[in-house]
Image (cartoon, rainbow, N blue to C red):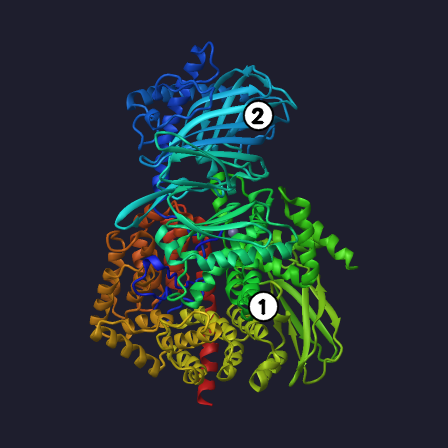
Amino acid sequence: MDLEEKREKRPPVTPMMIEEEAALRNGSRGLPPGSWAEAAGPRPRTTERHIAVHKRLVLGFAVSILALLAVTMIAVLLSVRFEECSAAADGPPRGTGNGSLPGPARQPPGAGQPPGRPEQEEEEKEARGGEVAEEEEEEEWQRRRELPPWTRPRLPRHLRPLHYNLMLSAFMENFTFSGEVNVQLEVLNASRYIVLHAHRMHIEAVRVAEDKLAGGVRVDRSFFYPQTQVFVVVLNRSLEVQKSYNLKIIYNALIENELLGFFRSSYVLHGERRFLGVTQFSPTHARKAFPCFDEPIYKATFKISIRHQATYLSLSNMPVETSVFEEDGWVTDHFSQTPLMSTYYLAWAVCNFTYRETVTRSGVVVRLYARPDAIRRGSGDYALNITRRLIEFYEDYFKVPYSLPKLDLLAVPKHPYAAMENWGLSVFVEQRILLDPSISSISYLLDVTMVIVHELCHQWFGDLVTPVWWEDVWLKEGFAHYFEFVGTDYLYPGWNMEKQRFLTDVLHEVMLLDGLASSHPVSQEVQQATDIDRVFDWIAYKKGAALIRMLANFMGHSVFQMGLQDYLTIHKYGNAARNDLWNTLSKALKRVGKSVNIQQVMDQWTLQMGYPVITILGNETTDSVIVISQERFVYDIDAKPKDPALGDSSYLWQIPLTIAVGNTSHISSEAIIWVSNKSEHHRVPALEEASWLLGNINQTGYFRVNYDIRNWRLLINQLTRNHEVISVSNRAGLIDDAFNLARAGYLPQNIPLEIIRYFSEEKDFLPWHAASRALYPLDKLLDRAENYNIFNEYILRQVASMYLKLGWPTNNLNKSLVQASYQHEELRREVIMLACSFGNKHCHQQAATLISDWISSNRNRIPLNVRDIVYCTGVSLMDEDVWEFIWMKFHSTTAVSEKKILLEALTCSDDRNLLNRLLNLSLNSEVVLDQDAIDVIIHVARNPHGRDLAWKFFREKWKILNARYGEALFMNSKLVSGVTEFLNTEEELRELKNFIKSYEGGAAVSFSRAVETVEANVRWKKLYKEELFQWLRKSLTH
Ligand SMILES: [Zn+2]
């Protein structure tokens, strides 16, 4: 699964939403930091608004379910001949033995509302009956001093599904569907209970029969238990061990309007609205589409049939085997049986899309399905083409063929994530897969590419071999995220993604988050279904990827690759836990004569939170001996004594530290030192007077490195004299380490600022990018300080010469994508952003000229790649008319990406009245979309003129905001961290603490992270701000 805002924001330019292509980046006062760390708030994006609706529906369903349960029991008691029980709300019992499904005419009454919802009065009466049954059931278990199996967070282990036959009828005219599922069950332990997942559906009938024998097993009663999202079938006798049974359930439900389970979506074609139905089951939503054992460990085979109107087509994981047409314009597609698989990547769709196709060398048919106009324009061709190449790449890399005969890529208008890796039917939101080469920017192409590489990796890591349980979701997500860079390098060998861009976009970003004392380990225990979403966070994706990259580097890439091949071969069509991977990799190492206990090493990295900082100290008396020590890195050193677990002795890692020795013109090859103690002595040959040491070569390790001041000085001299002796990724690594070490108080404040003094000569994008991201939090700590302009001036001096050299881009609307040099354009953008945000006069002038030209000509000729910078700079510098102009454009434009950067530009104003007006307007859903309101508040908080306004607004409107976003955990935490992360005065810290006392309201984790961050900010200012300004003053007078 690919989370939405996984990289910095890039322009999602899709053919269907464009009149003006535009860069989607977020601006802020003077600093439009698309590329400036969004790091504190990276949360998976699911839909925001549907969650409240969801809760209401759940409640409604819970009530009607209880009612049905009662009726069910009565029906069972009355039933003499049938094992099926039938709910009164849906009319008389229905024969279901022939497996035929109810057609539209036989649907539940009141379709379009939750099916089977009885009248109010009846509902209350029945509900009471339902409670009685459940209570009795629970009492019986209490007498046995056990928890009833349906109340436990995980399914009981006495049954195992072997095969599902699932027949569905999709009624697109009223968005309901009915289904019949036949599950073949194996009994591992005798029990009278069948407990499986089912949620938000109406069950019409249940029958249990012994396989291969005619006789049924009488169903005593059945009921939903909404707290654990299960359906319980109580039998009148125990199922016998080693026998297999067939469980048949007939049910119906809605094709939901929220983006989970089996849901609907729509688009407009030739002025006519068209609908489609599609699924999103990961992690726990298959249970909304059919009763099933909805945990990844329960792999089974699936045979799916979908009945739909012939005007639609249906898709699922496997190809259609046969289609049976009926006279009334309906058709049933019968799909081939799947291999063994888990429920969360099962999928189907009912739509009237068209497709283009290609075939891989090994004969896999790849099709891209999208709305007909997009297919006609060829917007899917890029994705189709790279998918074919990537399947070939992965088959070659993993030495395991793609497992299914086909792979469909489905481009849908709405999806809760960027994409989902359903086996053989991967679903993508249109903006992440459709691309028109003539109007898309390079960074948009990169985004599309990486999402596809990610989902394709999952066809092996996740689909073919599946994590045993969600605590190890990082296994699949970490691999897919890491391979985004490896796979993109295969497609574009010159881009060096794995060696370079990985650092800023993954490593540096997640180290910010994981450097908080309140972080959590990458393997997270999780039980409740409602908690599972929580594990899909940046720690799982980015730290997972960073750990895997470290592993690949210390093992050696070819041995690592061999190990992965073995792992996939051994565990294919099954599940694996992290230890299975570690064992296989250890064996691969052994085969090449190396002995490392990978489990022992990696457990420290996956089960402990945070990461170490290594300190390398030279020895005054013996040149060739160095002292290496490790401790846990945290931004707020004061947080340590508060938590004894953070104390010195408890956090230890086995660290594969690579080091090299360099002098003015040369750097040695790297050597690896395994550091496993708090402090160790090591001998380094060839360490002479003038030579420097460099640790963590190319930043392959997930840790920071600090040195004695003498070594830092030598490194700074080297960069000034000849920076190319130190590789691009090492330069970026040194910059990120130095800024963050200084921020946490491990290093004098002047060191990072001295490092970037060589920037007049730096022609590579990556070190600029690393510096710009690291400067961002520092800038926010200083931007309201009296002496801010000294800092400003210092940064401007470092930027000026490269700004002059590079100049501004021209509008390259008509240029082909691949012609433009990706690195060069990114570098230029980065430098312009720094220049404009720190107040370079020429940059301001240029932005003002471009805005004026737009206003006077009403033609937007601003180059796409810098639009956000220009808008933001224009709004902050120019008068209110410009704000009004941008406001008007925000209303009139229909291009989603352009709308977003226009809105964010409005937050760049210096005028507090305008900022207040914007804040108040942001809560009006007619004007600003719910999900964008959060961005408005956060961006005003980034503006030093608006920080206190946003903070005040946040506290005053907290009740409204919490009601609106509270149930979407990540939205709330994005808001909380976005508004608070740059508060840095004692007064603000007090306000925050007081506010939490009075109003916590559910976002406890976010607020404790916020307190930690603000405390660290306050502490930094108290201890280091003056030191920094003193050094800056001195430095500027020289
Ligand atoms: Zn994924």
Residue 766 lies, with reference to residue 892, above or below; the image says below
Q: Nearer the viewer, mark 1 or mark 2?
A: 1
Residue plotted at (71% across, 77% down): 619
* Residue 836 horizontal side relative to residue 167, left or right: left
* Residue 604 horizontal side relative to residue 867, left or right: right
Q: Which residue is mark 1?
A: 499
Crowdedness of circle 1 by 10 Å Cα count: few (<14), some, many (20+)?
some
Cβ of mark 1 under 8 A from ligand 1: no
| Residue 37 on image: x %, y % | 45, 65
For this rendering, which residue is in front, 1000 or 870? Answer: 870
Crowdedness of circle 2 by 10 Å Cα count: few (<14), some, many (20+)?
few
Q: Earlier in the sequence, mark 1 or mark 2?
A: 2
* Residue 987 horizontal side relative to residue 273, left or right: right
* Tag 2: amino acid: Glu
For this rendering, which residue is in front, 157 or 399? Answer: 399
Residue plotted at (62% across, 51% down): 607
Residue plotted at (45% across, 20% down): 96
| Residue 278 on image: x %, y % | 41, 42
For this rendering, which residue is in front, 49 or 521? Answer: 49
**Residue 355 seen by the camera:** yes
Residue 749 lies, with reference to residue 486, above or below; the image says below
* Tag 1: amino acid: Lys
User: In the structure shown, which secondary structural element does the residue marked by tag 2 occupy?
Assistant: loop
Q: Which residue is mark 2?
A: 146
Where, by quadrant of the figure, is residue 507 drawn? bottom right
User: In the structure shown, which secondary structural element does the residue marked by tag 1 occupy?
Assistant: helix
For this rendering, which residue is in front, 958 or 486? Answer: 486
Residue plotted at (55% across, 32% down): 155
| Residue 231 on image: x %, y % | 48, 27
Residue 491 lies, with reference to residue 284, above or below; the image says below
- Farthest right residue? 593
